[in-house]
Image (cartoon, rainbow, N blue to C red):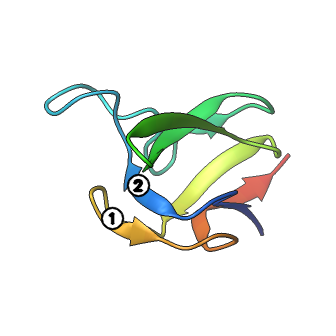
Amino acid sequence: MRFVTAPLTGVWYTAPSPGARPYVTVAGEVAIGQVVGLIEAMKLFNEIKSDVAGSVTRLLAETGTLVKRQQPLLEVDPR
């Protein structure tokens, strides 16, 4: 298993806006460079991209919560 981690500290969002479809779901596929979520830091939204390809096995951070730099966000079973 590999993890997609937060590159910075901020508030984690799994979708582009409230009520929108999430970027990734459990059992969904993710590609290298694919946007998996957003982190809001200092009023700016930063796209978080996957550095691993595979199947998402777990979402480790709940949307709207504060995440710290290097905190795991997703668990991915690599291809």
Q: Quadrant of the N terminus?
A: bottom right
Tell me: residue 62, above or below residue 56. Answer: below
Which quadrant would residue 49 be assigned to in this image?
top right
Which quadrant would residue 21 be assigned to in this image?
top left
* Label 1 SS: loop
Which one is in front, 35 or 46? 46
Tell me: residue 16, above or below residue 73. Answer: above
Q: CA distance from mark 2 to mark 1?
A: 7 Å
Amino acid type, label 2: Trp
Q: Percent position (x, y) of residue 74? A: 58, 60
Q: Percent position (x, y) of residue 79? A: 86, 46
Q: Residue at (46%, 35%) from the top-left corner?
A: 45
Q: Which mark is residue 17?
A: none
Residue under numbered circle 2: 12
Q: Residue at (13%, 30%) from the top-left corner?
A: 19
Which quadrant would residue 63 be assigned to in this image?
bottom left
Total number of numbered labels? Answer: 2
Tell me: residue 14, above or below residue 2. Answer: above
Dot 2 and dot 1 residues touching (CB under 8 Å):
yes
Tell me: residue 68, above or below residue 42. Answer: below
Residue under numbered circle 1: 62
Q: Residue at (27%, 57%) from the top-left corner?
A: 64
Amino acid type, label 1: Glu
Q: Is residue 31 left or right of residue 14?
A: right
Q: Residue at (59%, 51%) from the top-left corner?
A: 56
Q: Is residue 36 left or right of residue 15?
A: right
Mark 1, other Cα within 10 Å: few <14 / some 14–19 / many ≥20: few
Q: Percent position (x, y) of residue 59? A: 46, 62
Point out the frontmost of discs 2 and 1: 2
